[in-house]
Amino acid sequence: MKGIWTLVVAVSVIFVGCMYVSGTPEGDSSVRLTAVDVGQGLAVLLEREGRFALYDFGPDSVGVVDTLLNRGADTLEWVVLSHFHRDHIGGFMELVGRGVFVRRLYVGPDLSSSFFRDSVYRVAGRLAIPVDTLVRGERVWFGGARFDVLWPTDYAKVEGNGASLVLLGRYGEARVLLTGDLDSLGERRLLEMNPTLSAELLQVGHHGSAGSSTLKFLSQVAPKYAFVSVGAGNSYGHPVESVVRKLNLVLGDSAKLFRTDLRGSVAFELDSAMGVVVP
């Protein structure tokens, strides 16, 4: 009997080690998701009952750390960096000595060899932040919300935008799809592996560039709301008009497309009973 109990404990430890759990699904409070206005970049802040987590960290030199502190987010249960491009990870490199504590860092299998990737690992090492690599089939939790990793796979040889960690968040009836800078090829592969993929709320890939957001992808996901994190007057022309037209067509109402260049930070509530709600 003692041997069986020891085996059960060991298996439990292994299982928990594959999924970092923050908070519990108990209670009626919603999860707040905020697309933080970081200019031409991406930072998505999750909050529930005084706890916080972050998907991407925005670019450096735009005050992302100050924004977190102003919102009371001095501890992040986890940070997911979708890929190693400066406009998604720059803020992370400014953490040293700033008073924001990160419990765990997740990265994807981005093969990009760059100063930015090396800098992320240096900062994590200096701050003693545990680092794990996520691939398709794994998941992380936050405040009762489950985030499944849909891309990349453990066998894909990808880098840059195509390596973006794609998360499908579920909280009761609410569904949110976070795509980072995933390109159209990645969208196609995503649909091949997830033919019934859908979400109420979509983070528009690559800031609304022409190389992402195919009509087939948008039609399949069929979001009720979508948001684009983009800098005002950016030199790339993001979001491009063709993507805006496709989004308006799929959403059915241009008022359901939210842009940080026009509105600043945009918040949504993930309600376990009602789904995604705009406050």
Image (cartoon, rainbow, N blue to C red):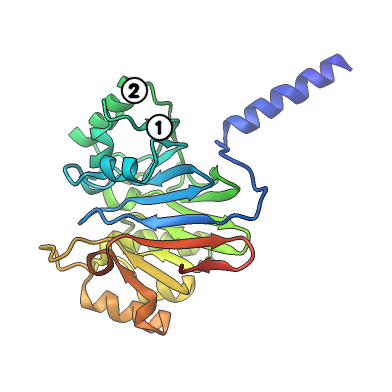
Instruction: Locate residue 69: give its quadrant.
Output: top left
Q: Which mark is residue 143?
A: none
Q: Position of residue 125 (x, y in %)?
A: 33, 22
Comparing 56 with 94, the one in front is 94
Mark 2, Cα crowd under 10 Å, few <14 / some 14-19 / many 20+, is: some
Q: Position of residue 90 (x, y in %)?
A: 23, 41
Residue 198 appears in view: no
Q: Which part of the image, by quadrant, shows the N terminus?
A: top right
Indicate whether 228 appears above or below 121: below
Q: Residue furthest top?
A: 2
| Badge 1 element | strand
Mark 1, Cα crowd under 10 Å, few <14 / some 14-19 / many 20+, is: many
Say what amino acid the circle numbered 1 marks: Val
Query: Residue placed at 28% from the left, 27% from the top?
Result: 123
Instruction: Locate residue 104: give its quadrant.
Output: top left
Comparing 7 with 178, the one in front is 178
Q: Which residue, given by chain and number where applicable, does mark 1 sit on?
A: 102
Residue 244 appears in view: yes
| Badge 2 element | loop
Left or right for 190, reference 146: left
Q: Give the CA distance from mark 2 to mark 1.
A: 9 Å
Instruction: Locate residue 12: give its quadrant.
Output: top right
Say what amino acid the circle numbered 2 marks: Leu
Query: Residue placed at 37% from the left, 58% from the top?
Result: 186
Indicate whether 92 appears above or below 49: above
Q: Which mark is residue 127?
A: 2
Left or right for 51, reference 8: left
Query: Residue placed at 65% from the left, 48% from the top?
Result: 25
Q: Position of residue 269 (x, y in %)?
A: 50, 61
Q: Position of residue 262 (x, y in %)?
A: 24, 69
Q: Residue furthest right?
A: 1
